[in-house]
Amino acid sequence: MKPDPNFLIQLANTRMPFGKYKGVFLIDLPENYLVWYRNKGFPKGKLGQFMESAFEIRRNGLEHLVNQLKKSG
């Protein structure tokens, strides 16, 4: 499968669609929340892929790279 070149841009601009952190950019979710989901199991589909990627990015201290891709406004 070919990597999607827009994946990080989409991740940077996707907000949590439900729950306590509804409306928060996925990359800005608290790390302990992402760890909890990692242990519980990420949601299915694109949201789960984004959350799992956000977890790995945060774990490696690279969120500043994704934050640069956020759309202003």
Image: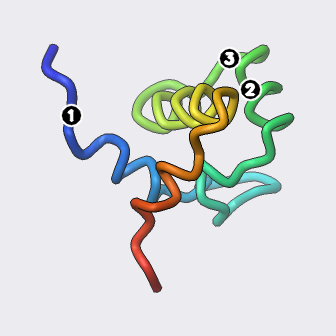
Q: Secondary structure at mark 2?
A: helix
User: For this view, does 68 lie left or right of residue 41?
Assistant: left
Badge 2: how crowded within 10 Å, few (<14), some, or many (20+)?
A: some
- Relative to 35, say whether 66 is above or below: below
Residue contact between numbered discs 1 and 3, judged by CB atoms under 8 Å: no
Which amino acid does the dot numbered 3 rest on? Gly
Residue contact between numbered discs 2 and 3, judged by CB atoms under 8 Å: yes
Q: Which residue is mark 1?
A: 4
Q: Which residue is mark 3?
A: 41
Which amino acid does the dot numbered 2 rest on? Tyr
First-in-chain label (1 vs 3): 1
For the point 34% across and 52% down, the residue is 9
What is the x, y in percent for residue 59?
69, 28
For the residue pair 5 and 50, the one nearer the viewer reads as 5
- Relative to 66, say whether 39 is above or below: above
- Distance, label 2 to label 1, CA atoms, is 24 Å
For the point 13% across and 20% down, the residue is 2
For the point 41% across and 34% down, the residue is 46
What is the x, y in percent for residue 15?
55, 58
The quadrant holding residue 3 is top left
Q: Quadrant of the N terminus?
A: top left
Which amino acid does the dot numbered 1 rest on? Asp
